[in-house]
Image: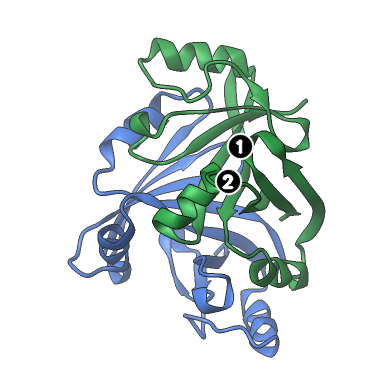
Chain colours: A blue, B green
Amino acid sequence: MKIIGIDHVAIALSDLQELGDLLRELPGIEALGTEIVEDQGVKTDIFGTGRGKIELLASVAEDSPVDKYLRKKGPGIHHIALLVEDLEGMLIYCREKGLRLIDEEPRRGAGGNRIAFLHPKSTGGILIELCEKP
Amino acid sequence: MKIIGIDHVAIALSDLQELGDLLRELPGIEALGTEIVEDQGVKTDIFGTGRGKIELLASVAEDSPVDKYLRKKGPGIHHIALLVEDLEGMLIYCREKGLRLIDEEPRRGAGGNRIAFLHPKSTGGILIELCEKP
């Protein structure tokens, strides 16, 4: 049970076009596709950087977490996702350390990953996702 | 000349303690040290994740960029840094594409890296650093 790297950085935007167009033009960046994550109310354009991904997030549902974030803070880097081995074990470890979790159990994220978010109350206010490959 | 990965994600905090303590306890995360970057007015605690770093930033100078960010937005993910091969070539390429740059020429960042920031006006409002290993 351990963290093995940054899986992705997720960026909340009102409009995916400007930064998406820029990333598509940067040498070394690969557009990996677009996905709707229904239970988060987001559309995500995913880009590979060679080591870790960038996910651009736009809200497709009123009052989605990304919609609320944008209204409160404007465009910004919404969360960082750390790749883990043994997500269940990591969640048990985090609970034993007294950390608050948003997701007590893993749920399904983009790309078929299993994911769980730590609660910002336990992370200095920063949204951190733990994810495990399918 | 190309991007080869996410080098680090930088997180602006009023207090490095809470998230720093959490990262030090997470299996797989390695504390790599602390550095003062004088010309940015920041102290940074740097952590390895196995693939990409997390840099926690606190302001050590009034009106530093991080101080201004915290007053405007509160704690948050301040920027993402992409590792590049041939930083000068990448800056020329970006200028040719009409992108605005904060740094027209590479300057020195943490860890002896050579770095340059793209201007948020050209990136949908997101602060993106390009960096090259020494």
Which amino acid is tagged 1?
Gly
Q: Residue at x 58, y 62 (%)?
A: B14
Is disc 2 surrounded by few (<14), some (14 to 19) or many (20+) residues within 10 Å? Answer: many
Q: Is residue B43 left or right of residue A10?
A: right
Q: Is residue B24 left or right of residue A117?
A: right
Question: Label 1 lies in what chain?
Answer: B
In the rendered image, the quadrant that contains the N terminus of chain A is bottom right
Q: Nearer the viewer, residue B73 or A75?
A: B73
Which amino acid is tagged 2?
Gly
In the rendered image, the quadrant that contains the C terminus of chain A is bottom right
Percent across and percent down for residue A23 are 41, 32
**Position of B15 relative to B128 (above/below):** below
Q: Nearer the viewer, residue B2 or A123?
A: A123
**Position of B127 relative to A24 (above/below):** below
User: Residue under circle 1?
Assistant: B5
User: Residue under circle 2?
Assistant: A52
Q: Is residue A86 left or right of residue B97?
A: right
Between the C-alphas of marks 2 and 1, the distance is: 6 Å
**Are dots 2 and 1 in contact, CB under 8 Å?**
yes
Is disc 1 surrounded by few (<14), some (14 to 19) or many (20+) residues within 10 Å? Answer: many
Percent across and percent down for residue B17 are 69, 69
Residue B58 appears in the figure? yes
Percent across and percent down for residue A130 are 57, 68
Q: Residue at x 67, y 73 (%)?
A: A86
